Image: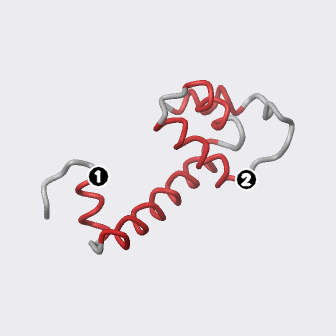
Amino acid sequence: MFARFRKAADSPPADDRRHNIFEAAAAYVAACAEDDQDALDEAAGWVSPEALSFGVRELACRAVIALARDHDESPTAVVRELMDLPAA
């Protein structure tokens, strides 16, 4: 899984501008959700694998918090539902 990060991280961004970890994470997760391998590879090359991992983790936390607030549920309940796990 991380081999794809390393491969893409060796090349500079296509548009020659610096991207921050949150831009990279947002683009990476959106590309994953849309099953867009080219965009996934591009976003993975914007920052180091460690930075991308941190950004994706932060995005996941923020998304769960937002969903929990919107649905008036606990973050635990939201995560379990998203992952198709039985209610705790």
Residue 25 percent location from the top left of the image: 59, 48
Q: Residue at x 49, y 34 (%)?
A: 34
Residue drawn at x 24%, y 57% is: 80
- C-alpha gap between disc 2 and disc 1: 27 Å
Looking at the image, residue 62 sits to the left or right of residue 5; the answer is: left
* Residue topped by disc 1: 82
Q: Could you tell which of marks 2 and 1 lies nearer the N-terminus?
A: 2
In the image, is residue 81 above or below residue 48?
below
Asked where in the image residue 12 lies, by quadrant, the reply is: top right
Whole-percent x and y of residue 35? 48, 29
Height in image: 61 above or below 12? below
Q: Where is residue 84 drawn, in percent x and y?
A: 21, 48
Dot 2 lies on which element?
A: loop
Q: What residue sits 76% from the left and 48% below the top?
A: 19
Q: Amino acid at mark 1?
A: Leu
Mark 1 nearby-residue class (10 Å; few <14, some 14–19, many ≥20) = few
Q: Compared with residue 10, is residue 33 higher up or lower down, i.e. above or below?
A: below
Q: Nearer the viewer, mark 2 or mark 1?
A: 1
Where disc 1 sits, the SS reads helix
Q: What is the crowding at mark 2: few (fewer than 14 residues within 10 Å), some, or many (at least 20)? A: few
Location of the C terminus (image quadrant): bottom left
Provide the residue designation for mark 2: 20
Q: Residue type at mark 2?
A: Asn
